[in-house]
């Protein structure tokens, strides 16, 4: 699942490269329509794009969660992530560390302007 999926490029790449089922969530309907168009053009069948506020996303059955969200939004969804994500879920936060998850970090890719932080739910 990609929260704030924009044009869906990250989740589309994951579906194409790894053959997984993907879900993109964004509040902007124009971006959702673009994402669906691109996925259809790439013949990606195992992907859905939903127009939804990221604060209302369903985290049940998620194995990998990708975030490129502002720290304020991450802070708002953090209680739900702590409660609803199942053990061994991989959370990838591009751009911003997740405060309070220092003990869950398993890897970091340092890049400019944004680093990517990998967390494993225990």
Image (cartoon, rainbow, N blue to C red):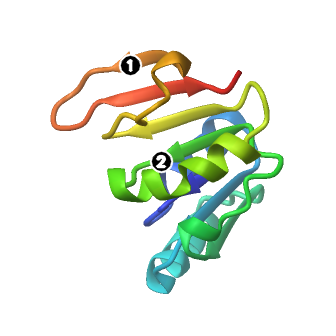
Spot occupied by residue 109 in the image (x, y as percentages of width and height): 34, 21
- Residue 86 in picture, x, y percent from top left: 79, 36
**Residue 18 at what x, y percent from top left?**
68, 34
Which mark identifies residue 108? Answer: 1
In the visual, does 15 lie left or right of 76? right
Find out whether the residues at labels 2 and 1 contact each other: C-beta distance under 8 Å: no
Secondary structure under the numbered disc 2 in the rendered image: strand
Work out whether 11 lies above or below 120: below
Viewed as shown, does residue 96 lie left or right of 25? left
Q: Residue at x 46, y 80 (%)?
A: 28
Q: Which residue is mark 2?
A: 67
Counting residues from the start of the chain, the first of labels 2 and 1 encountered is 2
What is the distance, in whole Å, between disc 2 and disc 1 at their CAs? Answer: 14 Å
Q: Residues within 10 Å of mark 2 (few under 14, many from 20)?
A: many
Residue depicted at 76% across the width and 59% down the height:
45
- Who's the residue at 44% across and 51% down the image? 75
- Taking the image as drawn, is residue 14 in sight? yes
Residue at 38% x, 39% y: name it.
94
Q: Name the one closer to the observer, 99 or 51.
A: 99
Category of crowding for the residue at label 1, using alpha-carbon neighbours closer than 10 angstroms: few (below 14), some (14–19), many (at least 20): some
Query: Compared to 5, does 83 lie above or below?
Result: above
- In the image, which disc is placed on residue 91? none
């Amino acid at each position: 699942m990609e929260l704030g999926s924009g044009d869906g490029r990250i989740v589309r790449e994951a579906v194409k490269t790894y053959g997984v089922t993907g879900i993109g969530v964004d509040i902007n309907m124009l971006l959702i329509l673009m994402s669906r168009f691109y996925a259809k053009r790439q013949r990606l069948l195992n992907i859905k794009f939903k127009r939804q506020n990221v604060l209302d996303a369903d985290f049940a059955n998620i194995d990998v969660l990708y975030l490129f969200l502002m720290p304020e939004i991450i802070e708002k969804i953090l209680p739900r992530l702590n409660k609803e994500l199942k053990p061994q879920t991989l959370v990838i936060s591009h751009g911003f560390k997740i405060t309070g998850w220092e003990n869950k970090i398993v890897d970091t890719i340092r890049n400019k302007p944004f680093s990517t932080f990998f967390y494993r739910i225990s």
